[in-house]
Image (cartoon, rainbow, N blue to C red):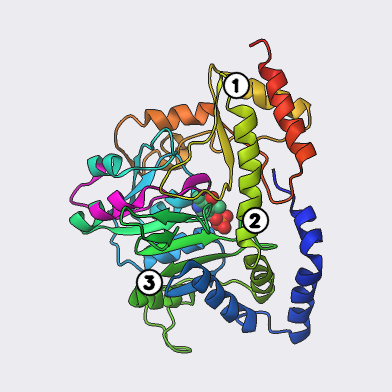
């Protein structure tokens, strides 16, 4: 699905230098690279403050811990997402309210959210799934009207850009109160281990998040609130500084792959290629097609027989997971989420794909559908 080895070899000189320099300095936690990376990513995103942390799941937890929520408060999340988004909601004693998604964009919409709002609703967590922004403008209006906070889960969409109706553009994660992201190796901006970040234009919230991520500490050995220990280590920060320089190029490379898939696959009757919104760029964390007529699993098996990996993100919606059985609330029948789980298939997409690989994949898909 990704070729991290080939990417490393292409960037080897800079990455090796970054790693060895860190070891030579031997300041492994919160050194020069940690600070520089936070500033550089904040600048790239045009956001006031960014705090790097241990991983994308921690990032969501830190964000929610900074919001002064109380047990029983309701948090609206899409049912079609990675479990991490909702897991921390349960962990903090909050109530995940699982709502359906739009069948074209795979993301939640203001209309869907509106039906789920009650007196207990405090927070909305849109997920910019697969690399394209959730339609944030109507969601921010709705949140404002109902006095709700918004945390954007940007683990799959770092660098994507959303355009408002007045022409203003903002990067994913910088529209709501807080953005969170992950530097898991296969993410668009991935390190060589675990990493994540929270960011905000609200300086007060950012300071609270900095404290939460660092044992609730205001100044050294003074702990004002209960926090956690979540940090990005110096070697990962050094690697991420190198890769951040490449992030726009990574997105471009992924888009070239996506354009090729679009062109080759759009004519196949039983396939639906990813929908492209006019008001968001797409960074193609995943290239996810929908396969109709119950042919998804057969196609996946066929591709596997040709040594082509393809993955189902995600096979089960949150509301059908045992962990959420007695925890969350469900709004509506969530039929789109359920149907997507039976139709979606994500094809290999990464920064190192070549035309030969791409043609082999699209030819194989075409030959599967030949005669169907
Ligand atoms: C990867 C991911 C996370 C969690 O990130 P980790 O770094 O693995 O903890 C959260 N939300 C979404 C949508 C993700 O894709």
Residue at (69%, 43%) from the top-left corner? Answer: 1
**Residue 250: image tag:** 2
Mark earlier in primary sequence (3, 2): 3
Residue 231: image location, x then y, percent: 56, 72
Q: Is residue 122 magenta?
A: yes
Q: Residues within 10 Å of mark 1 (few under 14, many from 20)?
A: some
Mark in front: 3 vs 2? 2
Please give left or right for residue 323 compared with residue 136 in the image.
right
Residue at the farthest front position: 167
Mark earlier in primary sequence (3, 1): 3
Q: Helix, strand or loop at disc 1? A: loop
Helix, strand or loop under label 2: helix
Instruction: Provide the residue designation for mark 3.
Output: 201
Residue for point 68% across, 74% down? 238
Instruction: Check whether the beta carbons of the residues at disc 2 and disc 1 lie within 8 A of each other.
Output: no
What is the span of residues highlighted in magenta in the rendered image? 116-141
Whether residue 30 is visible: yes
Residue beneath label 1, please? 268
Residue 317: percent from left, percent from top = 46, 36
Work out whether 160 lies above or below 25: above
10 Å crowding of disc 3: few (<14), some (14-19), many (20+): some
Dot 3: element = loop
Residue 14 vs 132, above or below: the answer is below
State the CA–CA distance, disc 2 to disc 1. Answer: 28 Å
- Examine the rendered structure and indicate whether residue 25 appears above or below residue 359: below
């Amino acid at each position: 699905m990704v070729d991290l080895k080939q990417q490393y070899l292409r960037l080897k000189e800079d990455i090796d230098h970054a790693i060895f320099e860190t070891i030579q300095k031997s300041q492994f936690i919160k050194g020069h690279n940690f600070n520089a990376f936070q500033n550089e990513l904040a600048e790239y995103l045009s956001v006031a403050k960014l705090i790097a942390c241990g991983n994308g799941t921690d990032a969501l937890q830190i964000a929610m811990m900074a919001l002064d929520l109380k047990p029983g408060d309701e948090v609206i999340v899409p049912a079609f997402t990675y479990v991490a988004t909702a897991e921390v909601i349960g962990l903090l004693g909050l109530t995940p309210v699982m709502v359906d998604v739009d069948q074209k964009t795979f993301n939640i919409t203001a209309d869907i959210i509106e039906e789920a709002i009650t007196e207990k609703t405090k927070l909305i967590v849109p997920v910019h799934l697969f690399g394209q922004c959730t339609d944030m403008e109507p969601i921010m209006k709705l949140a404002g009207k109902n006095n709700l906070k918004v945390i954007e889960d940007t683990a799959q969409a770092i660098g994507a850009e959303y355009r408002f109706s007045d022409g203003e553009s903002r990067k994913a994660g910088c529209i709501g109160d807080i953005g969170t992201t992950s530097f898991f190796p296969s993410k668009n901006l991935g390190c060589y281990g675990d990493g994540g970040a929270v960011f905000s234009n609200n300086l007060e919230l950012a300071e609270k998040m900095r404290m939460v991520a660092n044992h609730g500490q205001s100044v050294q050995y003074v702990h004002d609130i209960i926090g956690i220990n979540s940090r990005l280590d110096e070697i990962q920060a050094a690697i991420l500084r190198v890769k951040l320089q490449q992030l726009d190029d990574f997105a471009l490379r992924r888009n070239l792959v996506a354009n090729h898939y679009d062109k080759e696959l759009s004519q196949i009757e039983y396939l639906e290629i990813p929908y492209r919104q006019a008001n968001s760029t797409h960074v193609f964390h995943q290239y996810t097609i929908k396969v109709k007529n119950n042919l998804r699993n057969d196609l996946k098996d066929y591709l596997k027989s040709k040594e082509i990996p393809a993955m189902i993100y995600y096979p089960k919606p949150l509301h059908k997971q045992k962990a959420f059985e007695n925890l969350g609330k469900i709004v509506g029948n969530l039929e789109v989420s359920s149907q997507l789980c039976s139709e979606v298939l994500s094809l290999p997409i990464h920064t190192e794909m070549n035309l030969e690989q791409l043609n082999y994949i699209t030819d194989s898909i075409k030959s599967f559908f030949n005669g169907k």
